[in-house]
């Protein structure tokens, strides 16, 4: 059915203007004043922002890790994402051992099938590049429409790649027109620090942060930058947390290197002291890289404002406190790494960013949607409000006040790191390709209606990015 959104303030990464939007067959077909169509449903957006649907470039749904599995699968995770204003996610296909890369992609398709309430795409993790996987990679990326590969410099026992594998990944990605995403921490040194702490009898959650110092994130970021530059490849640094990493990214970009960076809501708003809470409460705040001392937040906000960091990912990787986080009750190194942020990513950035005057509404749209669409080859199909784009739209009330709580969130976890926080701004209705997923703050979507979005290689160019 045709729809006309009337009376709202349309905000993109470049403009804010009052206009009506006509939607037909899942696309935006007209933007203008006083639009009419006898057969269209009228959506009243008076007093609201009309925003492009959020694109979350960093999620881990139904992911095995630390001898357990994340609690949010493609059903609860994408419903929660939709409530939070996100209409497209990019999730990570994890590979293992001698498994074919195509097998990993098939597994992730199976995880999403019949469950996703919103659109989605994949990144492909690379742990090792054997002659077989090197031969398989080009055809697989082309066939599956994947423009991004992920390499870990951390988690030595699970995912960590060698520098040689990382460098080879950069070279292959350059030739294919893809971008390499890197988790930048020095995993080998971290493992040594963890063992030292355990031998000294430390088991408290705070030691998760103390054994992963910011200097090791900065060192790994510098190493990844230089390897990418030598290979002539594009680098996307995931979940940047600290001044040390930000400084390396800024220095590289000032030299003209193709380096882009992402940070996440907790690094902008929470700090290391959360891990020192009495008892075992600090385990709720264990993820990697860890929370940093509070002064790092100013450097992250400044880097976002200066566009030295471009995107906000949730790094959704949820483990309930009871049962799963408690696996590390007597050993901080066994606490499953990850937190639940897919639902509150949008609101936290608006409330702490726009409402408090740190960023403009245009910068918000860019960080939450447009830049991710450009970097990963989704733009202009997604990430903006324009004629011909998918009608992925959020009707957003900038004056709404709500309190975050595990009692009311839609994620399948028993705690929320922002429990009790008062936030300003809330999605009211969310449309994916012109169809309601959230209507007046109620889920009305259809599980399995989310589409897998193929992205063409070689679209991630400097001209396309312009960021």
Image (cartoon, rainbow, N blue to C red):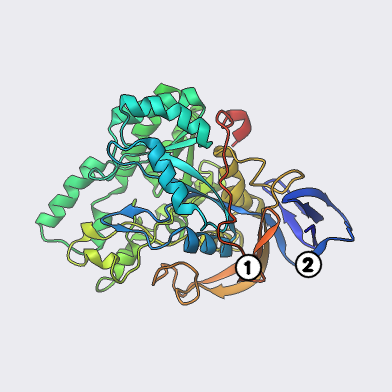
Instruction: Give the residue at x 58% y 33%.
Output: 456
Where's residue 107, x and y in %?
41, 47
Q: In the rendered view, does 398 fall on the left or right side of 154?
A: right
In the depicted structure, whether residue 215 falls above or below residue 227 = below
State left or right for residue 17 relative to residue 159: right
Q: Give the SS element for disc 1.
A: loop
**Residue in front for this viewpoint, 393 or 117:** 117
Q: Residues within 10 Å of mark 1 (few under 14, many from 20)?
A: some
Residue 375, horizontal then vertical, whole percent: 55, 38
What residue is shown with label 1? Answer: 444
**Is label 2 in a helix, a strand or a loop?**
strand
Image coordinates of residue 319 in percent, x first then y, are 35, 63
Task: Confirm whether residue 323 shows in the render.
Answer: yes
Rendered-image quadrant of the C terminus: top right
Query: How many other residues sit within 10 Å of disc 2, few (<14), some (14-19) or many (≥20)?
Result: some
**Residue drawn at 43 percent across, 56 percent down:** 316
Give the total of numbered labels: 2
Q: Quadrant of the N terminus?
A: bottom right
Vertical comparison of 296 with 330: above or below: above
Left or right side of 138 for 462: right
Determine whether, in the image, residue 445 is placed left or right of residue 228: right
Which residue in the structure is indicated by mark 2?
A: 44
Which of the 4 quarters of the picture holds residue 46?
A: bottom right
The percent coordinates of residue 199 (x first, y second) are 9, 55
On screen, 327 above or below 379?
below
Camera-side residue of 334 and 46: 334
Question: Can you see residue 239?
Answer: no
Identify whether 4 is placed above or below 444. Answer: above
Mark-to-mark CA distance, 1 and 2? 18 Å
Look at 34% across and 56% down and name the residue there: 287
Question: Which one is earlier in the sequence, the residue at label 1 or at label 2?
Answer: 2
């Amino acid at each position: 059915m045709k729809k006309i959104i009337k009376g709202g303030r349309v905000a993109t990464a470049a403009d804010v203007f009052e206009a009506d939007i006509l939607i037909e067959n899942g696309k935006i077909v007209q933007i203008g004043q006083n639009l009419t169509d006898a057969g269209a449903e009228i959506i009243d957006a008076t007093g609201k922002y009309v925003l492009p649907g959020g694109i979350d470039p960093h999620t881990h749904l139904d992911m095995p890790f630390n001898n357990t599995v994340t609690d949010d699968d493609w059903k609860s995770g994408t419903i929660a994402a939709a409530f939070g204003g996100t209409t497209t996610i990019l999730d990570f296909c994890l590979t293992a051992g001698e498994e074919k890369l195509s097998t990993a992609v098939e597994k992730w398709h199976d995880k999403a099938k019949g469950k996703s309430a919103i659109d989605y795409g994949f990144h492909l993790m690379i742990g090792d590049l054997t002659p077989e996987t090197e031969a398989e990679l080009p055809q697989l990326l082309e066939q599956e429409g994947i423009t991004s590969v992920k390499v870990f410099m951390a988690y030595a026992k699970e995912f960590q790649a060698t520098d040689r594998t990382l460098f080879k990944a950069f070279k292959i990605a350059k030739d294919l027109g893809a971008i390499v995403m890197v988790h930048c921490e020095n995993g080998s040194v971290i493992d040594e620090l963890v063992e030292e702490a355990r031998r000294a009898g430390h088991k408290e959650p705070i030691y998760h942060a103390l054994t992963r110092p910011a200097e090791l994130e900065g060192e790994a970021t510098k190493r990844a930058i230089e390897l990418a530059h030598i290979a002539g490849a594009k680098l996307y640094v995931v979940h940047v947390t600290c001044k040390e990493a930000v400084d390396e990214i800024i220095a590289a970009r000032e030299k003209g290197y193709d380096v882009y960076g992402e940070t996440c809501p907790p690094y902008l708003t929470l700090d290391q002291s959360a891990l020192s809470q009495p008892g075992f409460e600090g385990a709720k705040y264990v993820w990697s890289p860890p929370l940093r001392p509070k002064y790092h937040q100013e450097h992250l906000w400044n880097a976002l404002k200066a566009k030295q960091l471009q995107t906000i990912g949730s790094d959704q990787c949820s483990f309930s406190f009871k049962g799963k986080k408690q696996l590390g009750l007597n050993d901080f190194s066994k606490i499953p790494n990850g937190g639940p942020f897919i639902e509150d990513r949008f609101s936290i950035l608006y409330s702490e960013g726009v409402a408090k005057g740190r960023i403009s509404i245009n910068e918000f749209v860019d960080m939450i949607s447009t830049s991710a669409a450009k970097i990963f080859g989704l733009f202009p199909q997604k990430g903006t409000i324009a004629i011909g784009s998918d009608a992925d739209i959020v009707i957003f009330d900038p004056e709404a006040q709500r309190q975050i709580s595990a009692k009311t969130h839609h994620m399948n976890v028993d705690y929320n790191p922002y429990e009790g926080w008062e936030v300003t701004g809330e999605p009211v209705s969310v449309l994916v390709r012109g169809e309601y997923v959230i209507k007046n703050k109620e889920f009305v979507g259809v599980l399995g209606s989310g589409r897998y979005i193929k992205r063409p290689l070689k679209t991630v160019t400097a001209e396309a990015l312009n960021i």
